[in-house]
Image: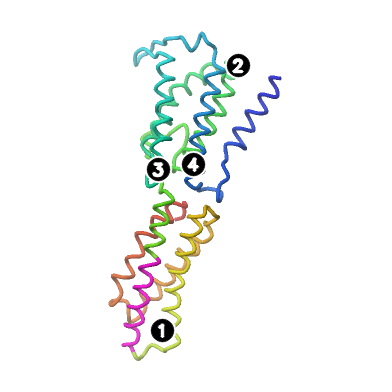
Amino acid sequence: MKAINTIVLALIAIGAAMPAAAQPGRLYDKDVKQLLDQTKQSYERYWDALDNQVKNTTFKGPAGEFIVKRIDEDYRKTIDTARERFGGNSSAGTEVTAILREAGRTQVYVDEKGSAMKGASEWQAHATLLGQLAAQYGGTYPPAANQVLSRHTDMEVVSAATAIEAYSKQLAGALENALKKDKATPEAARKAMVADVKRVGDTAKQLGSAVKDAKPATAQVQTLADQVKKVQDAIGASSAAAAVTGQLGRLNAPLGVITSAFGLK
């Protein structure tokens, strides 16, 4: 029976801990919320497995007294606060940071006691989930010193994609007007540059729809980044560069949000 339980815990840590993600790497908000829920559930399994004598213990150390039951209460509240805070335009980065920080106290204790301790395997399953959660915020578990977590929500990504779509339309119009004034630019070249700008808007629109529907989007993010670079390089080398600098520059901030959200450089 113990062997079966161990296998189940391993599956929880490796498999069930990975929600139905839209793509490897970045999870969508609904999946991160699921990960937070699994974090709570896995901690409850650890607490249930812990020896009752340990639950009622008070430890004394250089930093003062540590009452195990109080640590448990505080940690549960921290997890619940993150779960309540997460959603919409809030990624609950501060609250998730608190989860990882507070988990460190129990992590030290479990590491000291070793794998023979009651609840050690359950804690390891919990710690695996914490590592996956931290990764969604660009961090690690156990957390590095002065680790700062951040994550762009789906809503922020969609808003950024919508902005690029709108800016590309403005840029396409301004670019066409500027190039028409330059008689040295062949008509075919002018049309090709404007078409490239419009493609940026089309890709941004497709990306926004994919994120809304929680569909794979990493490839579209890379395509969008490549398209923007192509447009910026081409316009920068053209006679229209000075006339459309403002419109061209507006693409940078929303593109930065998107590439950051998906972990692209």
Give me the residue at 39% from left, 52% from top. Answer: 156
Which mark, residue 154?
Answer: none
Name which of mark 2 and mark 3 comes first in the sequence. 3
Does dot 3 land on a helix, a strand or a loop? loop
User: Residue at label 3?
Assistant: 91
Mark 4 in CB contact with mark 2 (< 8 angstroms): no
- Of badges 1 and 2, the one in the foreground is 1
Q: Is residue 71 magenta?
A: no
What span is in magenta? 165-182
Using the numbered discs, state the Cα–Cα distance from disc 1 to disc 2 in whole angstroms: 72 Å
The three-letter code of the residue at mark 1 reads Arg
Closest to the observer, 169 or 116: 169
Using the numbered discs, state the Cα–Cα distance from disc 4 to disc 1 in whole angstroms: 45 Å
User: Residue at label 4?
Assistant: 32
Using the numbered discs, state the Cα–Cα distance from disc 4 to disc 3 in whole angstroms: 9 Å
Which mark, residue 116?
Answer: 2
User: Residue at label 1?
Assistant: 190
